[in-house]
Image (spheres, rainbow, N blue to C red):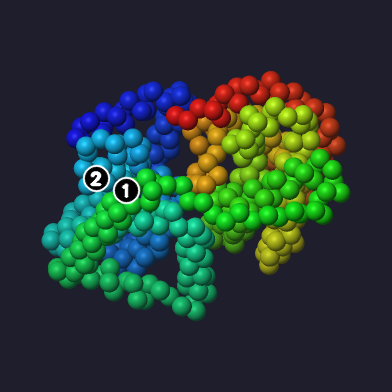
Amino acid sequence: MFKRFIYLEWKAFFRSASFASNLALKIFMAFIAIYFTLVFLALGVMAFYILKKLNLDPVVTVNKFLIYYFLFDLIFRLLLQKIPVMNIRPLLIFPIKKPTIVHFSLGKTVLSFFNFIHAFFFLPFSIVLLYEGYDVWSVILWHIAVFSLVYINNFLNILLNNKDNLLGIFLGIVAVLGGLHYYKFFDITTYSAPFFDGLFHTKWLFLVPVLALAGLYYVTFHYFKSNLYLDAGLSTKDEIAKTENLTWLNQFGTLGTFLKNDIKLIKRNKRSKTTIGMSVMFLFYGLLFFSNGIEAYNNPVMHIFAGIFVSGGFLITFGQFVPSWDSAYYPLMMTQNIPYKGYLNSKWWLMVIGTFISTIIASFYLYFGWQVYLTIVVGAIYNIGINSHLVLLGGAYTKTPIDLSSGKGAFGDKKAFNVKTMLISLPQLGLPVLLYWLGSYLANANVGLALVTLAGVIGFALRNPVFSLIEKIYKTEKYATIDAYKQKG
């Protein structure tokens, strides 16, 4: 039966309406996977000797920070890992045992890249330990325990997949623990390190994560088996409808009508709420650059790069899917007497408001100095003047229907990957970095900031002719977009 399931998955992949773009995305993702594989492999081989040079015990040091390693792993899974479930509904009318369906679906997650990537760190690290004369059984049992924890994260991600707001909770936990650790108020590794050290030095302790993994698989299996009904776990959940008039927006005419729809969309749907969560995460992205914690990021050119992200988190995450947010009713909308310019104008204003709010909230970066916050403000000006137009332009070619009831895929979907959108996205980050570098090279950092600001002001001044051009492109792509939104494969 498993062989038949694999055959069906293979057919579904090649018969998909988006096969070409899906294949292109998989090739692109393969290169990213190879890159991270090489990074993990290098770390796995060199970690032992690097820690030795720093006069640190490699095993003790790695065990000390494994708690953060697995917390970040779970966060990335919640954020990025898609649960490879089958199209279960059609199978329920056939004489196929439900345990077989569930076992196969869960087995697909075991083969995920998010699990295999860890082997490229822990396996070389374990081999180096054996080469350096560590006890063979201690290394083997520790390795088994660590990979049991990796797969515990895998099944935790499956169980937590449909729980709202968990990503924000886990991020908050890690941020609080990391902050308390950094400022030496509380060190969670004091309590977690003895457990991970015990996995290495106490022979029987490896059974704890192994048995926990077996128990978690049992729980996950029975959870999905018990919900494998069309009128239970596979049914669409309806919520009580709430009405919001937002009458204060009526004074803005057509623009106000579109803004009301967008505000309601953001407040009522999982996917749009996830986007808001992503934009909040972008606010703290600058801490990697401005806190001087990473030496490679501690230069002004990288700072302007961070300034674009900090102020433009909402613009980037929301704007990349215009008009896909309205894909559910886009064909109907196109039959109405709706001016494209008014529709795009409302999206533009929403992104501008989001950028303005992000910039105000980011004022906590004043802690690092006026120059840092000035960089963020300059990034906001560039986002409003240039990037707001670029993301709208890219949206004309991003024919990705969005399931608003799903919180997954906040960073993109398979149809969002094409050459045109990639070329359009290059000036979003490349141009301000180039302008800043040019100004700094010819004069000083302030001249670089002035050039980036000037580019943003010019883009804002040319807003009307640029909007006319974007409107024409949307009209040209109109029928191809409608056709893409109707496809379900």
The residue at the point 75 percent across, 53 percent down is 245
Q: Is residue 376 left or right of residue 457?
A: left
Residue 291, above or below 94: below
Residue 399, above or below 278: above
The residue at the point 23 percent across, 55 percent down is 126
Q: Are marks 2 and 1 in contact (CB under 8 Å)?
A: yes
Q: Is residue 203 left or right of residue 154?
A: left
The residue at the point 71 percent across, 55 percent down is 244
Which residue is nearer to you in this view: 369 or 250? 250
Q: Is residue 397 left or right of residue 258?
A: left
Residue 134, image x and y in percent? 17, 61
Q: Which element carries disc 2, helix, strand or loop?
A: helix
Residue 340, image x and y in percent? 75, 30
Dot 2 or dot 1: first in sequence order is: 2
Q: Where does label 1 land, which residue?
A: 228
Which residue is nearer to you in this view: 317 or 295? 317
Outermost residue toward the bottom? 185
Q: Count up the numbered dots.
A: 2
Residue type for callout 2: Lys
Residue 199: which quarter of the image? Answer: bottom left
Residue 98 is tagged as 2
Quarter of the figure that contains the C terminus:
top left
Q: Is residue 337 left or right of residue 185?
A: right
Residue 295, above or below 178: above
The residue at the point 33 percent across, 35 percent down is 90
